[in-house]
Amino acid sequence: MTQVSTVEIRGRTLAIMLTSPRANHVGSTGAVAVSTASPDHLGDPLLALNLKREIAELWPRVDEAGMGHMAKTLVRQPTLRVSLMVLRRGSVIREHRADAAITLQSLSGRVALTFDDKKLELGAGEILAAAPRMCHDVEALEDSAVLLTLSWHTTAEASPSWG
């Protein structure tokens, strides 16, 4: 099952494809290819995941996609999203912003985030928190796995494009 959503980055609308976990689908938009694990269970009131296994399953898909990075939605609640992202060294996710408050936790490797002209590096075990609507770039300085959390105060604030 494939669902297409859109996101605006630098005034350009890009399609993001949400697919089943075993699909070998790659979006050709330049956006992060996004897949959802166990779509029937993403919104369960209690959900336990093995991040090491999720990371191991995502790396081969990055190479198949040829984009240098991929994300997988792990949790989808009305006011909360958690996504696992893997990025190959040198890959860049160009300037974008989220309407939600975010945290980005580096699980492995090293990434650099640029907010306006301020550059921050995150290594394994480090976390960054940012207020809603802060424009930023993400660059993988090493092969990296990061956990992205988006949190809205109310369901009305939650991005409709993320379901």
Image (spheres, helix red, strand yellow):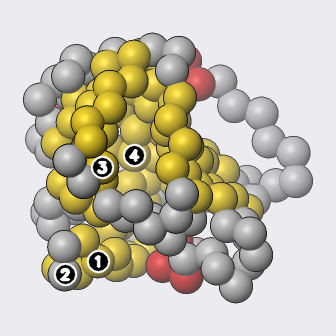
Q: Earlier in the sequence, mark 4 or mark 1?
A: 1
Determine which of the numbered discs, if any, sits on residue 11 in the image: 2
Q: CA distance from mark 1 to mark 3?
A: 17 Å
Of residues 108 and 134, the one drawn nearer to the viewer in this rendering: 134
Cβ–Cβ below 8 Å for labels 1 and 3? no
Disc 3 versus disc 2: distance between alpha carbons? 17 Å
Label 4 or label 3, whichever lies nearer to me, is: 3
Q: Position of residue 57 (x, y in %)?
A: 43, 28
**Gap between marks 4 and 1 measured at Cα:** 17 Å
- The mark nearer the N terminus, 4 or 3, is 4
Indicate left or right for 118 with 150 as reference: left
| Residue 59 coordinates in the image, percent (x, y) | 32, 27
Marks 1/2 in contact by CB < 8 Å: the verdict is yes
Residue 8 image label? 1
Can residue 92 be seen here? The reply is: yes
Q: Which mark is residue 71?
A: 4
Left-right relation of 23 to 69:
right
What's the amino acid at mark 3? Phe
| Quadrant of the rendered image containing residue 96 | bottom left
Please tell me in which quadrant of the rendered image residue 67 appears. top left
Instruction: Tell me how far mark 4 sits from mark 3, CA to CA.
Output: 21 Å
Q: Earlier in the sequence, mark 3 or mark 2?
A: 2
- The reply to whether dot 4 and dot 3 touch (C-beta < 8 Å) is no
Residue at 79% across, 42% down: 47
- Tell which circle, 2 or 4, labels the residue nearer the N-terminal end: 2
For the residue carrying disc 2, how many other residues have a C-alpha within 10 Å: few (<14), some (14-19), or many (20+)? few
